[in-house]
Image (spheres, coloured by chain):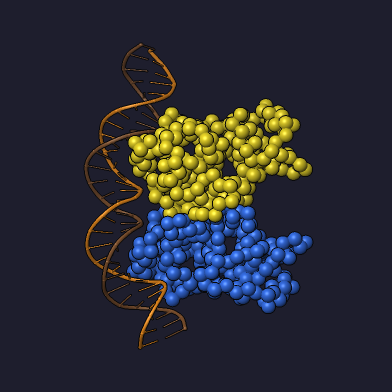
Chain colours: A blue, B yellow, C orange, D brown
DNA sequence: CGGTTATTTGAAATACGTCAATTCAAGTGG
DNA sequence: CCACTTGAATTGACGTATTTCAAATAACCG
């Protein structure tokens, strides 16, 4: 729950009352096992765990559209989900709470925060496209690590949680597991970053950012590529 | 103008009055030369020509996010444009009309049609992601041709306009020009489709669809990959 | 501990990119 | 109508990134 609150606070200013409101939702949570399909009959807030939105092709190839972390919403755009054949799958145990009531409520910092996270998601998708289309495997992996670090509010932290299998990361980046594994070994050898035991530990942050090519922590002010 | 009207009519039902309204916009058009950056100080409707939204990296690599054809809108989401470092560039001579007034007007079939095209764009972006991440060059090219055919309302036509250089198509698909050229030669040899002189001519439509892997003409009803 | 799943490594195949040159198509000016 | 230019399409030869296949650890979990 702490992670969810941190993510939400980074997206909009929440009053103490709103924080209490979220905490009060605790008893209503729904739990999903790792691997299960998150059937959202309406807008939900993830308060715990990791998930991903994805599409699977008939022959088994999978492309992950985006990850979902605590403090982010799912099920807010069911029409688009259906049209894009997008489904949301739990990667770890996941807890959500139903925010259907919030959708039409007059004023709500909580809703604003979730909507802000959805807007961030839209923007991130463009980075994702460039990453898939024009970056090398090495650049893709570096950019991904920085994107997650930034997203988790760990921009300055040397270490942050990243409880993802290499298979998941490979399916985000459009790479084979084996090749991703080799790239990560390069990172380890060069002391850029090490991912182990569900944790990422950044070594040479500057070199990592250089490898990522695309800027990650955007302020909306910078113009360069 | 005819192309724009056809595209719009495919997106929403337009009354005769609304068609007249669009035609009346004729005198207000702005013209852009091929290659120029479309500086949209507000929502515009493309009524003629082809453009693309793209991002260029410092080292010159380019990824095209999407094409823009007559009857589609640009400049409707300037915040997202800026955040994603997205710019719109004319690929041919382009004509647009300003629709700023329409944005806040009470009821307008024209605005509904443009908003529908923006929603289609959002959905298409997910196909784009899967295409970039998980399809082979051969599959990418086949899917792209079918997507354009569908989008131009030429689903049943053996031939339709596609005035794009191979460089542009390569930058859509995240391929090198040379490799795309070889794939297109394969298509020509196998009689799947031929692109020449700004026109695409489909030979074996069934084989082309099979090569594309991803379904294109979506009804919202089918579930399969 | 035992069984399962994830990671790691090697060797080989292949898809795709780069470099460089040639051909082709479409003006443009004489 | 014909050089001449320019940009696009095409092709060959070659290099490299990435995938595939297969097997060997290593980490996790009940």
Residue C2 x %, y %: 36, 85
Q: Is residue B64 left or right of residue B120?
A: left
Q: Where on the picture, by quarter, is residue D18?
A: bottom left
User: Looking at the image, which is closer to me, B211 or A103?
Assistant: B211
Residue A171 visible within the image = yes
Q: Quadrant of the N terminus of chain A?
A: bottom right
- In this rendering, position of residue A177 left or right of residue A105: left
Residues B67 and A88: in front is: A88
Asked if B130 appears above or below B10 in the picture, the reply is below
Horizontally, residue B156 falls left or right of residue A1, namely left
Where residue D30 sits: x, y (%)? 47, 83
* Residue drawn where x is 56% and y is 47% of the image: B218
Horizontal and vertical percent for residue B199? 46, 31
Who's the residue at 54% across and 69% down the image?
A: A36
- Residue drawn at (67%, 36%) of the image: B98
Give coordinates of residue A84: x percent, y percent: 56, 53
Tell me if residue B28 comes above or below residue C17 in the rendering.
above
Which residue corresponds to the image point at 63% horizontal and 57% vertical from the top-left? A78
């Amino acid at each position: 729950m702490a992670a969810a609150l941190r993510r939400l606070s980074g997206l909009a200013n929440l009053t103490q009352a709103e924080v209490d409101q979220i905490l009060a939702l605790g008893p209503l949570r729904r739990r999903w096992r790792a691997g299960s399909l998150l059937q959202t009959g309406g807008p939900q807030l993830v308060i715990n765990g990791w998930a991903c939105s994805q599409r699977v092709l008939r022959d088994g190839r999978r492309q992950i559209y985006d990850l979902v972390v605590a403090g982010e919403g799912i099920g807010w755009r069911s029409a688009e989900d259906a049209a894009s054949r997008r489904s949301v799958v739990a990667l770890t145990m996941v807890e959500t709470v139903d925010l259907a009531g919030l959708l039409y409520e007059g004023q709500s910092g909580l809703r604003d925060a979730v909507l802000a996270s959805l807007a961030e998601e839209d923007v991130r998708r463009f980075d994702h496209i460039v990453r898939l289309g024009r970056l090398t495997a090495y650049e893709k992996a570096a950019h991904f690590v920085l994107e997650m670090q930034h997203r988790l509010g760990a921009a300055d932290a040397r270490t942050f949680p990243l409880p993802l299998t290499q298979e998941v990361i490979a399916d985000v980046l459009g790479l084979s597991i084996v090749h991703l594994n080799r790239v990560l070994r390069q990172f380890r050898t060069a002391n850029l970053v090490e991912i182990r035991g569900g944790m990422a530990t950044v070594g040479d942050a500057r070199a990592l950012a250089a490898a990522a090519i695309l800027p990650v922590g955007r302020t909306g002010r910078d113009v360069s590529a």
